[in-house]
Amino acid sequence: MAENPPRGKTLADYNSDVQKRLAVLVDERPQAEIARLTGTSRTKVHRYLHGTTIPTTFAVSLVANLGV
């Protein structure tokens, strides 16, 4: 059975956390490389960095392919 997230932390908080980690990755690698490694477009990587909600599939790809 899945555990409930800690009280007080919302999905928006988690999205913000992933956006911050993505920003660190962009300091280390070009957006185009992140896009290639996650199977998405550079445009979408840019959108995720600037506020678009990050889909689960992209987050999973970050973990699987970039060790986030």
Image (cartoon, grey):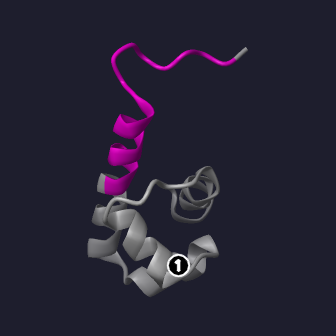
Which x, y percent locates residue 6? 42, 16
Which residue position is annotated with label 1? 35
Type of amino acid under label 1: Ala
Relative placement, left or right, of 38 versus 16 is right
- The magenta-colored residue range is 2-19
- Position of residue 45 relative to residue 56, above or below, is below
Which x, y percent locates residue 64? 62, 58
- Which residue is at a point 58% across and 76% down the rendered structure image? 37
Residue lying at the far right in this picture: please name it.
1
Magenta residue check for 7: yes
Magenta residue check for 11: yes
**Which quadrant is home to the N terminus?**
top right
- Which residue is at a point 33% across and 46% down the rendered structure image? 16
- Which residue is at a point 46% across and 86% down the rendered structure image? 32
- Position of residue 10 relative to residue 46, above or below, is above
- Quadrant position of residue 27: bottom left
Which x, y percent locates residue 5? 49, 20
- Which residue is at a point 51% across and 57% down the rendered structure image? 67
Which x, y percent locates residue 14? 40, 38
For disc 1, the neighbor class at 10 Å (few under 14, some 14 to 19, many from 20) is some
- Quadrant position of residue 48: bottom left
- Quadrant position of residue 22: bottom left
Secondary structure at badge 1 equals helix
